[in-house]
Image: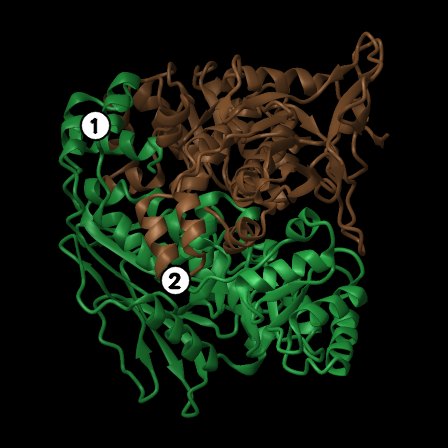
Chain colours: A green, B brown
Amino acid sequence: MTDHYELTMLAAALRDGTAERDCVFEVFARRLPEGRRYGVVAGTGRLLEAIESFRFGEAELAQLERTGVVDERTLAWLADYRFTGDVDGYPEGELYFPGSPILSVRAPFAVGVVLETLALSILNHDSAIASAAARMVSAANGRRMIEMGSRRTHEEAAVASARAAYLAGFTATSNLEAGRRHGIPTAGTCAHAFTLLHDSEEDAFRDQVEALGVGTTLLVDTYDITEGINTAIRVAGPELGAIRIDSGDLGVLARQARDQLDSLGAKNTRIVVSGDLDEYSIAALRAEPVDAYGVGTSLVTGSGAPTAGMVYKLVEVDGRPVAKRSSSKESRGGRKNALRRHKDTGTALEEVVFPHGEQPELGEHDRLLPVPLMRAGDRAEGLDSLAQSRERLRAALVSVPWEGLKLSRGEPAIPTTFR
Amino acid sequence: MTDHYELTMLAAALRDGTAERDCVFEVFARRLPEGRRYGVVAGTGRLLEAIESFRFGEAELAQLERTGVVDERTLAWLADYRFTGDVDGYPEGELYFPGSPILSVRAPFAVGVVLETLALSILNHDSAIASAAARMVSAANGRRMIEMGSRRTHEEAAVASARAAYLAGFTATSNLEAGRRHGIPTAGTCAHAFTLLHDSEEDAFRDQVEALGVGTTLLVDTYDITEGINTAIRVAGPELGAIRIDSGDLGVLARQARDQLDSLGAKNTRIVVSGDLDEYSIAALRAEPVDAYGVGTSLVTGSGAPTAGMVYKLVEVDGRPVAKRSSSKESRGGRKNALRRHKDTGTALEEVVFPHGEQPELGEHDRLLPVPLMRAGDRAEGLDSLAQSRERLRAALVSVPWEGLKLSRGEPAIPTTFR
């Protein structure tokens, strides 16, 4: 999980003696995806684990030797690699804005340079998914959200997407491995295939209820929805847990289904809708009798923004600020710190980014954003659990100005001030 | 890598006796991404390996037991799981169109149903990347293409993306693990960080040339490009391999750089450009003196279409065609076969999808598309290597009508006829 150029830089730096220079690398996003009001930091937990176990094993070293990517000295250095630096950063679940110093890695050049791809892959992917998911959760306004997008993304990205969605407030995921690996609740009952497998929809429903109980969710849109709902209640009785509708005009169908279920006495049977939902269609269904949303494609593809576009830049060498100076990709040198200012009401006002050494004046409702994440290569003590990060994001979103929670395109919810 | 509902369906089917019914599941795309003219089948090689090694291990079974997702009988069945069915499908590197039967899985319901998420995750991801990559390769018109998008996607998706890009004709990847795992050439030299690490650009260039040789690529846009090129040639001499420009107006800069290199006697020093390139900007640079493109974000995000949108549908049960009938997601029941008709010149005319049992009339230039991929759970003999799939795609693209290779939005390059 390393780019070729990281190791050629390493080889050159080991050769010329610059490998040991004390460096700070910073992760930040130059801008939010087009029209987005805020970003959600996600993947930090996965990244810290990945850094702790980042090694070059025998198979990797043999490949590097065979292909001549690096010289003997570098191979020997890589064989002993273990991250030994410090990492500070925004805790997972925190909001970020353009220029927020999301992560800083302090280490000798050689130790820090090889983490660029790993750090960016994890943070860019997970933050893109969590940022989209948070908008969907806002749009759903407290209703249950089930992540079911695994089939629309890479098989491992699927597990990470489920984790990011849960962080952002989704209730459950369809992905069993995400349940096992990250302790996320999983959900699911049956697909159309189960109905088609049977000689009739009634047979399928009866067998499903016998196997999974009347609390199950019956998928009623394989043939005719009205008929399907009648059959569902006839088979399961009015105590049926839920029905799911996966196609068609979901608003109209939800209303009709609610009326029909009520008229059949199934007043507590919930309605789950799925099928190409995104934050906009979720919001459009707010007035309809929908109890839960299943969201797939738009979630795992970041709803139009599949990557967060963060970069990993060298900002300090032996205490001296450094920065690229040519053209549009200019950046600010020097290690940074950041705080968020809030009104007395708790509403966020601005993100202030300032030089790392400075002692800022903190108002009563202001807070410093970065926290220690790793010290001398070990994870810092007292790091948040996924559940705590989830709660952190929920609280942070409450502080966003009302304008910034709108789904429509616009400027970042709060400005970033560089000092 | 399985969705919850696959196992609850399995549990219900084992209970009611339908688990052993002889089923055919088919993978197809209802449509191509908006405006695309063709799709590229990719991921088949990865999928067959994943199916062969698909097992439920102790940790997975323990989790399923603890969470009560399935009953005892199903746990015992899963513990012995091994895929035993047949798989046929379009070979990797083949083109596909709306409705093409890209993959068919024939197996007892229980054996086939648990593969839905795995099959779709791999095919949807890899095909989306390869389909975007093929357009970029067409636009580059024979110039070298280096995939460098790992940092913009999930760390494992990055490896699969590099593979899909190579399949589609990219020359090399920055991702070392893709080199190790899939035998793809890797490339890379230095980032801006290497220049910033040193006391001067000249120091950095000298050390890089000493470590990597004069054939290396020097990144000249950290400070001032004109100055950077002068320094590069002063340090490396006119035999310098290449320079890279990563920002700014790449067309203008490439022309200026070419003139400057030529005037310095570095007539064979190549120009590599990178920085937010996609198929359109690559095409726009066709008239400029660019020797190689480095492509990142747009490649790994499928250039606007990050998933191929394929589905995995039950189409046949005990020889009887089955299909969902309600609303917009209707599909065609029955197992299918497909052929592609061509003119005498070799140009493709139409994709014909027909019932599996039928014997079609094949013209001299027509060919059947699906091939055997697995038999009784083992991979079929004589499957293509990645290099062969790459050559297959190259040949298939030559057969696409001229209109269908245009980058502009439009209809599929050839129509699909369902018989």
| Residue B260 visible in the snapshot | no
Q: Amino acid at mark 2?
A: Thr
Mark 1 secondary-structure assignment: helix
Q: Position of residue A258 (x, y in %)?
A: 73, 78
Spatial separation of the CA atoms under disc 1 and disc 2: 38 Å
What residue is shown with label 2?
B67
Tell which tag, 1 or 2, sits nearer the viewer. 2
Note whether B29 is above or below B345 in the view shown.
Answer: below
Q: B251 and A164: which one is in front?
A: A164
Q: A378 and A390: which one is in front?
A: A390
Q: Position of residue B9 (x, y in %)?
A: 56, 53
User: Are the two marked residues, 1 and 2, in contact with CB atoms closer than 8 angstroms?
Assistant: no
- Badge 1 and badge 2 in a common chain: no
What residue is shown with label 1?
A58
Residue A119 located left or right of residue B249: left
Note whether A108 is above or below B132 in the view shown.
Answer: below
Mark 2 secondary-structure assignment: helix
Label 2 marks a residue whose chain is B
Residue in view at x 74 percent, y 41 percent: B31
Q: Badge 2, how many Cα within 10 Å: few under 14, some, many 20+?
A: few
Residue in view at x 18 percent, y 49 percent: A107
Q: B22 and A273: which one is in front?
A: B22
Residue in view at x 60 percent, y 56 percent: A190
Note whether A243 is above or below B60 in the view shown.
Answer: below
Q: Amino acid at mark 1?
A: Glu
